[in-house]
Amino acid sequence: MKTTAPYDAEWLEREYNNRARVPEHPMHFERWARDSAVAREGGRALIDVSYGHGAGETLDIFPAPRQAGKPPAPVLVFIHGGWWRSLDKSDHSFIAPPFVQRGACVVVPNYALCPAVTIPEITLQMVRALAWVHRHIGAHGGDPHRITVVGHSAGAHLAAMMLACDWSLVGDDLPLALVKNALGMSGLYDLEPVMHTPSVQASLRLSAEQVAKASPSRLPAPLVREGRGELTAMVGALESSEFLRHNRLIQSAWGERVVPVCEALPGLNHFSIVDALADPRQRLHQAVRSLLSV
């Protein structure tokens, strides 16, 4: 992208307005909502479990089938996107059943939305959500030592932040490797161009200080040690040049040891990539199963 200031606002709008780039996006949202309602009704889901006391601090749990003599299930935490300002965990329940059927426990957290909160505040909400999962998921058949975080778009940003988190500063009972590994779908890893995109900035109200503290690509690379895993970076090949750049950027910033996989998935756009996550035939779904070992 352009590196000289000032940013070209019209160009940024074209690059970052995914709903304009994908005119059929309402069909994706309608299908997600319909399939998510079925997912919640058809299983043993626990809905709106509190992980904190603030606005939006609830999560849904989709437990793995209990089997006598089997070890606790690996845990998939999925963080939804929506530019930190829209959508809801209830729109994404549909991603759970295919992984539950393979023996994983799936957790889908919510968070408060901008402009009522800032992106750093949302990041801390996800820290609280992951700490809650580590401390309590054992009661629901999940293994607190096998947590994989997957996020889409803004959620991919948050997933990367969870991998980079120093959990020793969050609680003495939390391991450094609380997040075993993570996968970012269509992630946003540098918030500076986002800050200059008018339609988005109107809600996010990013400051330069927030960009510096909450851009994964500007943070030290997580150390792949003591059981802490890697970040897999994937993006739809049909997405804008900026989203393709972000996907490459995080590998460049953190290095190939931390981000060994950096792929553009053929035929997928910013919304169909979420459908691919729930499709066992898709490379993305299979990559997550590999991270979960299911």
Image: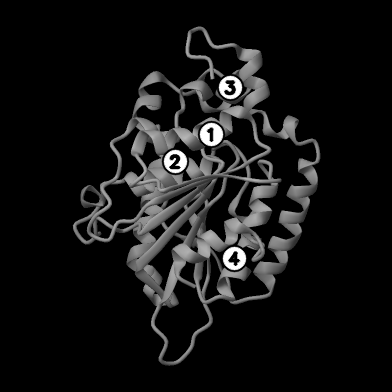
Q: Amino acid type of disc 4?
A: Ala
Whichever of labels 4 and 1 marks the residue nearer the N terminus, that label is 4
Q: Which mark is residue 210?
A: none
Q: Depth check: 275 or 293 in front? A: 293
Q: Is label 1 in contact with label 2 (beta carbons under 8 Å)?
A: yes
- Classify mark 3: helix, strand or loop: helix
175 left or right, relative to 137: left
Alpha carbon distance from label 4 to label 2: 23 Å
Task: Give the number of the disc on residue 122.
Answer: 2
Snapshot quadrant of residue 276: bottom right
Q: Quadrant of residue 144?
A: bottom left
Label pair 4/3, CB-CB below 8 angstroms: no
Dot 1: what SS?
loop
The residue under the point 45% across, 62% down is 291
C-alpha separation, residue under disc 1 versus residue under disc 2: 9 Å
Name the N-terminal-most of marks 3 and 1: 1
Disc 4, disc 1: CB below 8 Å? no
What is the three-letter code of the residue carrying label 2? Ile
Q: Amino acid at mark 1?
A: Cys
